Image: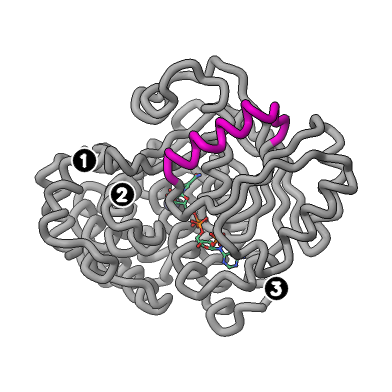
Amino acid sequence: MKFDFMYYNPTKIYFGRNAMDNLAEELSGYGDTVLLAYGKSAIKRIGLYDKVVDILKACGKTIVELEGIKPNPSYAQVMEGARLVRENHVQLILAVGGGSVVDCAKAISVAAYCEEEPWEKYWIREEAVENPIVPVASILTMTGTGSEMNGGSVITNEEQMLKMGRVFPAEVYPRFSILNPEYTYSVPKYQMVSGIYDIFQHLLEQYFSGDDDNTTDYLIEGVLASLIGSARAALRDPEDYEARSNIMWCATLGLNTITGLSKAQDWEVHMIEHQIGAYTDCAHGAGLAITAIPYYKYIWPFGAEKFVRFAKNVWGIDVSSLTQEEAALAGIEKLSDFIKELGLPTTLREVGTTEEMLPLIAESTVLGGGYKQMTPPEILEILKACY
Ligand code: NZQ
Ligand code: ZN
């Protein structure tokens, strides 16, 4: 563990079939008015909306609703939620849904009492939060993002064609999150595999940096082993409780900062995907799956040792008789096979990207990188390889 770190995560997790039993008691810690934030229709279809509303009413809460939060939540919806919070003096934002709903709730929390333009202040200039915030809590129905236990909030400004993420400090993290794997049974297969790949990619963004002997890397390899096995089991039987619960917890561990401790980290695949998402509105995990293979084929020489370790420790490849290049590429090939096994798209065309969009995406992508500082022309080459 070469780099110093501070670890603190304030989110209380209730996990399992009976997790909802804790909602009423948790609600007693907050004021009377709750903003119930949710997506388009899933929580009504699975009966969760009625259950939550019943508990809120039994606790004497006044419910204000923000419905229809879209996947890749928009800034316009954030501002609508912020208005509802101010006008109704909301004291808790309860997000019921996937990462988009939870991300939107955090954005509303910081935007409601912000005296400047929140987009510019928080997502462009990434300034500190000085205005009062409204506490957020979540009931998760779709796994992948880790938003249930982190400060991440990824918002799409549709006017500016920018999808920007940032990490807010601990007070914006959900105060508590209710994780019942059974709520994820109804997630359509395409969304389920997108979420699984999102988890995979979070772990890789943290893994592919540094070549030291870091405990965090062993932890990531362990979580990946669980994720690969559980993903296969969930594909065979979406109602396999053990598989769905493992996937749910892998997602939380994958981005609650514990699998990034003392790591430099990469995140370039995410930065590219965010702009693909801004132009196409594709499912986040699907965009990541498309981008990852060309990106890793390009950067592996800059972090060759780690790519060999990935082949050996994650995919169980016997690298003893392989050259460094053969071993690194064999590991990337296994990742590519796994993406295909999940049934995810592998080209940008499949998610509606046009050739004209490629330079626009390349120019607007936030640049970073783990082993290699990326440039717009390099991003464009990677996009062409994904096309
Ligand atoms: O709109 P509803 O009806 O709720 O349907 C949703 C949505 O269409 C559906 N769904 C959710 N739970 C369901 C269900 N359908 C049936 N049964 C259920 N139980 O699934 C669809 C996708 O939901 P969404 O919330 O968009 O998915 P996800 O959790 O993957 O969130 C994606 C967003 O999170 C951001 C992404 O960029 C994207 O905007 N991210 C957030 C991060 C963070 N906060 O740290 C990090 C990630 O890397 C990511 O960037
Ligand atoms: Zn992600």
User: Quick check: 217 above or below 62?
Assistant: below
Q: CA distance from mark 2 to mark 3?
A: 34 Å
Q: Badge 2: how crowded within 10 Å, few (<14), some, or many (20+)?
A: many
Location of mark 2 (residue): 278
Question: Contact (CB < 8 A) between labels 1 and 3?
Answer: no
Magenta stretch secondary structure, dominant? helix
Residue type at the position of mark 2: Ala
Examine the rendering and report whether any part of residue 318 can be seen: no
Q: Which residues are magenta?
A: 74-92
x then y, percent, for residue 64: 69, 41
Q: Earlier in the sequence, mark 1 or mark 2?
A: 2
Q: Quadrant of the C terminus?
A: bottom left
Quadrant of the rendered structure where residue 289 is?
A: bottom left
Residue type at the position of mark 3: Tyr
Asked which secondary structure carries label 2, the reply is helix
Comparing 341 with 43, the one in front is 43
Location of mark 1 (residue): 364
Quadrant of the rendered structure where residue 285 is?
A: bottom left
Kindly identify the residue that appears in the image at 75 percent across and 42 percent down. Answer: 63
x then y, percent, for residue 157: 35, 40
